[in-house]
Image (tube, rainbow, N blue to C red):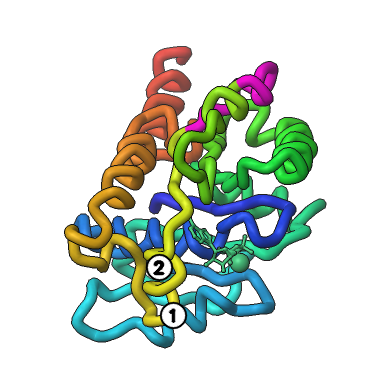
Amino acid sequence: MRTIAVLNAKGGCGKTTIATSLASALAWEGHAVALADMDPQQSTSDWLSHRPEDYPALEGIASGTSARAPDGVDTLIIDTPAGLAGNELEQIIKRAQTVLVPVLPSPVDMRAAWRFLSHLQEIRAVRNRDTAVGLIANRVRPHTIVYRELTGFLDGFRVPVVGQLRDSMNYVRSFEKGLAVADLPPYLAWQDWEEWETVLAWIRSKPSQGKGASPGRLLAAAMQRLTRG
Ligand SMILES: Nc1ncnc2c1ncn2[C@@H]1O[C@H](COP(=O)(O)OP(=O)(O)O)[C@@H](O)[C@H]1O
Ligand SMILES: [Mg+2]
């Protein structure tokens, strides 16, 4: 099963928005998606409880670290609380093949993200590239040079910026109704769809899947043991 965790030590950077938007987008693609909500504030669970029946269904899991996804689910998305650290953070990262880190393009948030990324690099699964990390610049306003700033500030981390999402009321308005931008009609949300397509392309790509315990990798390891005798 593919596990994608949305993480950043800072609150308000868009973790819940990105977890729910990604869940909805992948469900539209035909994936069987479960959303785990580790945040005691339960925003993702609230969102799910408002989700209308005539949109692609998503499974909800009330808590994260050890909770198992129901049978048949092929993608698990974990929304996390601010301030996640230590063993809990490590467990989540070990479990996920992919980590998405939303960052707001403000100097304060970028400094906080820098600290968080330094911390991530100390975790073995990230260092070994078992878990892939991608940054999403969130709430980007037109005509900002955020991309260049972000990639500049990331020098030395080798963490890709895998997308940028504009600041849009579409996120705010749809959220209240249990919907996300993928659920909105194209005349309203085509720009957001285009931005998400970039993120989804990365999610589909090999480098985003880390080296986690994929069947292919297990098979390769078994073959190697066999041929070694
Ligand atoms: N791209 C965006 N455009 C507009 N508003 C956004 C966007 N991303 C997040 N928000 C808003 O910012 C606030 C914080 O986002 P949220 O996803 O709850 O952050 P977190 O889960 O990291 O605390 C929410 O009110 C949300 O609607
Ligand atoms: Mg949240």
Q: Which residue is mark 1?
A: 176
Is 154 colored magenta in this rendering?
Answer: yes
- Residue span colored magenta: 152-161
The residue carrying mark 2 is 34
Q: In the displayed structure, does residue 58 sit left or right of residue 222? A: left
Residue at horizontal 37 percent and vertical 35 percent from the top: 202
The mark closer to the camera, 2 or 1, is: 1
Element assignment for label 2: strand
Amino acid at pointer 2: Ala
Residue shown at the point (28%, 75%) measured from the top left: 57
Residue 87 image position (x, y, % from top left): 78, 53
Q: Which mark is residue 4?
A: none
Which residue appears farthest toward the front when viewing the image? 143
Residue drawn at 70 percent across, 60 percent down: 11
For marks 2 and 1 on the same chain, the one whose residue lies earlier in the sequence: 2
Q: Amino acid at mark 1?
A: Glu
Q: Residues within 10 Å of mark 2 (few under 14, many from 20)?
A: many
